[in-house]
Amino acid sequence: MTEPKPKIAKQVFISYVREDKDLVLPYHDYLKDNGINTWMDIKKIKPGQDWKYLTETEFEKSALIVVFFSHYAHTKTGEFQSELKRAIKKLEKLPVGETCVIPVRLSDDTERHRDFAHLQEINASDPDSKVQLLNGINELIKESDAPFPIKESSPSFQRINPQFDISYKIETVKKPCANINNGDNDSTCDFSGDKLFLRSDSIKEISDISDILNSNIVERKLWFRKSSYQYNSPSNFHHGSEYNFHLSEIKTNGAILSVIYSWGSYFAGAAHGMRGLECFNFTLSPIMRIESIQELFVNTEGRFDTVGGNVLNKLLGRDYSSDGGAFPLIREYIIQQLKQAADGDFLTEPFENGASAWDDFDTFYFDSDGLHVWFQLYQVGPYSAGMPEVIIPYNLIDDLLCADFSKLLSEKRF
């Protein structure tokens, strides 16, 4: 049987319980030998590293999750159950009929997990179960619209989407923090970031976007170097500190381009690492940066169109008939969605403080299903709450958007 190779280096996360390690490792090795970019904790985490931070970060970066179920998996508490909950949330965000999870049943008498019962599973007892898994992963990779995550430097320009006249190339910068006093470059204080280069035959100034994004990489590198530096110390730098800033997604919706970076950091001596997202949004006709989410909802008269608030008024059961601005409507919807997904993780006071102004919603990007708003760690809850995301469907805000942005989102030529 011919076994296809993946065309895009998307990351596949291996989720399992430690008791099943010996049964799962052959699958990991087989996938890796056949070109799949896999992430499995015991293969990737080095002694002394923050395993929880790395596991959560790599899970979020992964496009696909392979979950191995067994008797142990059904009864064991801990990190595996947390991974299942995060996988369920990933599935809920996908359109009907799409998936990012492949379940594998390690024994025929293992019960199906109720939250994944609708997904076609693979039985390890089948002689070709490894081939089935490889083919399933390749099919999901082939059906995907855009590379997520973009794992390695691109040797040449690639189209963001076949129907758009925009191509990209990535160059990954990896730099140790040089010792300022004696020029020692053997520091284990490491920086890694992705530079992005854009090209288009029809959009002549698209390189301006690359300039903005790549200058941000340089600023991040200098910030990390300064943050890791120890003044009046013979060693100069906190050895063991790491900072990475990597490209996660590039999306085009109409004449709007969204570029999403994921970042992770660990400073020597810290209780745990940190991670987050930074989003850059640009209009393509003409090329301009969208600096804040507030810009989307302020029309040319500088006032809120109260007629446009009727949809959200009805949704929220609130009366915003007075000219109070778009902010209370958007904030109320976001808060309702966060509370529904909170499962008791959010604390009342920090929650309110972290969603109290337009600036709190500035980690956002445009996707086909709506406007996505992310919240950073600790912004609306404790570390365990992670980075919650709210999707505001376009049909709820169509009448609230500035006419210019409505037109840009409906553009078909990009």
Image (tube, grey):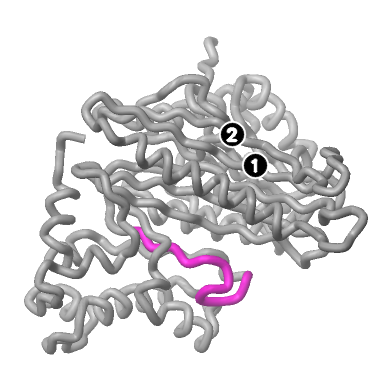
What range is drawn magenta here?
A: 372-383
Is residue 116 or residue 311 the one in the foreground?
311
Rendering coords of residue 285 (x, y %): 19, 43
* Residue 267, position as x, y percentages in the image: 75, 59
Q: Residue visible at 74% across and 45% down? A: 190
Question: As rendered, which of 156 and 13 lies closer to the eye?
Answer: 156
Check disc 2 and report the residue beneath it.
Answer: 172
The question of residue 73 being in magenta is answered with no
Q: From the viewer's perspective, is 242 left or right of 335?
A: right
Give how far apart the Cα atoms at labels 1 and 2 are.
7 Å
- Residue 110 visible? The answer is no
The spot of residue 315 in percent (x, y) is 21, 77
Q: Observer-nearest residue: 403 or 80?
A: 403
- Name which residue lies at 55% across and 29% down: 153
User: Which mark identifies residue 192?
Assistant: 1
Location of the C terminus by quadrant is top left
Front-lying residue, 343 or 180: 180
* Left or right relative to 19: residue 173: left
Q: Secondary structure at mark 1?
A: strand
